Amino acid sequence: MEKDSLQNLNQFIDKVNQSKKDNQLDLSSDEDLSIAIMNLVSIEEHFFFTAQKTGKKEEYFELLRVAREMRKDLLKKLIKEYEGEVWCISKHLLAASMRLMEVGTKALGQGKKEEAYDLFQKAYDLYALFWGLNLKVIKADDVKQIDEQAVNKHDEEKKGFLGKLGDLVKKAIDCCRE
């Protein structure tokens, strides 16, 4: 099973690279879309809290509904097939990633570099997990840990599963490609 997971990851990287050559895969647009979805989730939260704080529930809850419908429509562009609760998990992975980025940015502004870097890494790990699930690179039952950071017994880099997945996202998604 461990060897199969690593082989599947390598096959996926090969597929991504070939698709880039064939100009069939534009994950950079999907990455932009995922960031927009993160912001829409944030907007939904702000409409909720603003409705509660101002008492203008009808107005702000209607805006929340509109933002939610837009987010759902856009999420369908990224998540075409899913099983179980992968849809909801995906939404929460994006939302948590966005929040960790925001908290990390605040920590950085307060001079708390180590805390900020840790939060940024966690945000990126969640973001990579979102892509891993939705590009069908991983299945929940494939995720196993041999020791603290090894993905399998043949793992020499020992970056951990999320580290490997993060490397994959870096290779697959190039936001600067036009």
Image (cartoon, rainbow, N blue to C red):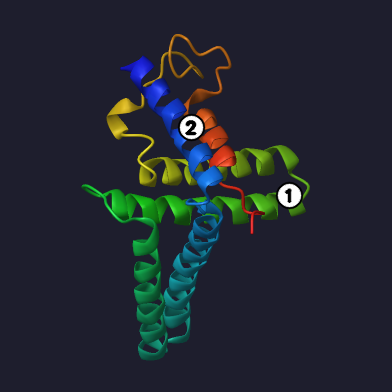
Q: Residues within 10 Å of mark 2 (few under 14, many from 20)?
A: few
Q: Nearer the viewer, residue 56 or 84?
A: 84
Left or right of residue 134: residue 22: right
- Which one is in front in this view, the residue at disc 2 or the one at disc 1? 2
Q: Position of residue 80 (x, y in %)?
A: 31, 56
Q: Position of residue 136 (x, y in %)?
A: 35, 40
Quarter-of-image position of residue 75: bottom left
Give the spatial CA distance, label 2 vs label 1.
37 Å
Give the number of marks.
2
Reply above or below: 163 against 74. above
SS under mark 2: helix
Q: Name the residue type under label 2.
A: Asp
SS under mark 1: helix
The residue drawn where x is 45% and y is 19% is 151
Q: Quadrant of the N terminus?
A: top left
The residue drawn where x is 50% and y is 62% is 33
Q: Position of residue 157 (x, y in %)?
A: 58, 16
**Which residue corresponds to mark 1?**
108
